[in-house]
Image (spheres, rainbow, N blue to C red):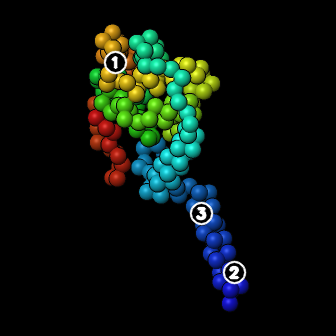
Amino acid sequence: MARGILIGIVLTLGVLALCGYAAVNAGWLPANADARPGKLETWAAKTSLRATIKRETAGLTSPLQPTAENLAAGVKLYAGNCAVCHGVASGPGTNLARGVYQFAPQFGRHGVTDDPIEETYWKITHGIRLTPMPAYSHTLDDTARWQVALFLKHQDELPPAVEKAWKAMKITEALAPPLPVRPPDRPGAQAPEK
């Protein structure tokens, strides 16, 4: 009896794996960036990200203090590396930011001051799989990554000169001006955030 149950479980798992393979191979799973991800995909990605960050940031602490110098360096680094996707203190997101999956948080409106600095540093360092968030571990040194994380953590309590630089930041002229928000082309598609 137990052998029959075990064989039934193995066969069921095999059929499910074969069906999953056929669905992927036939292109039945959405691969386009403008489709809303399914609940299972969203759950798996978020659960894995939270668990990975929790495991890999255990015992991690910033070696830098939030001095005016470090915060100013963080603002400058943010302008050159992050603003194109995550925006500036005022103004709409760029066309790039509004067209990516998953939507890049606009830090002028949706700051991450409540996130642990270690989490922000980890995301800057390693990026986030299956999103446009790149890993900066090969392009910014450790100090620079901590400076960006410090700026984002202390964004709501910046020294006056640093605050002025943040508020004056503009997206580079090389980028196209933001297009007006338009409704999605298909039923069920997600409209970009304003």
Give SS at disc 3: helix
Number of marks: 3
Percent from the top left, x then y, of residue 78? 44, 20
Foreground pick, 154 / 46 = 154
Asked whether the beta carbons under mark 1 and mark 2 sit within 8 Å of each other, the answer is no
Percent from the top left, x then y, of residue 8? 65, 81
Query: If you read the primary sequence from the N terminus, does the residue marked by circle 3 or circle 1 appear first?
Result: 3
Q: Which residue is mark 2?
A: 7
Question: How many angstroms separate mark 2 from mark 3 (CA)?
Answer: 20 Å
In the picture, residue 154 is in which quadrant?
Answer: top left
Percent from the top left, x then y, of residue 104? 41, 35
Query: If you read the primary sequence from the N terminus, does the residue marked by circle 1 or circle 2 appear first?
Result: 2
Left/right of residue 91 with respect to residue 138 in the rendered view? left
Q: Which residue is mark 3?
A: 20
Give SS at disc 2: helix
Give SS at disc 1: loop
Q: Residues within 10 Å of mark 2 (few under 14, many from 20)?
A: few
* Residue at x 44%, y 41% (from the top left corner): 102
* Residue at x 62%, y 57% (from the top left corner): 25
Q: Nearer the viewer, mark 2 or mark 3?
A: 2
Amino acid type at mark 3 = Gly
Q: Is 168 situated above or below 122?
A: above
Q: Is 4 situated above or below 112?
A: below
Any part of residue 128 in sight: yes
Of all residues shown, which one is farthest toward the right?
3
Amino acid type at mark 2 = Ile
Q: Which residue is mark 1?
A: 158
* Residue at x 30%, y 30% (from the top left corner): 109
Left/right of residue 130 with respect to residue 86 in the rendered view? right
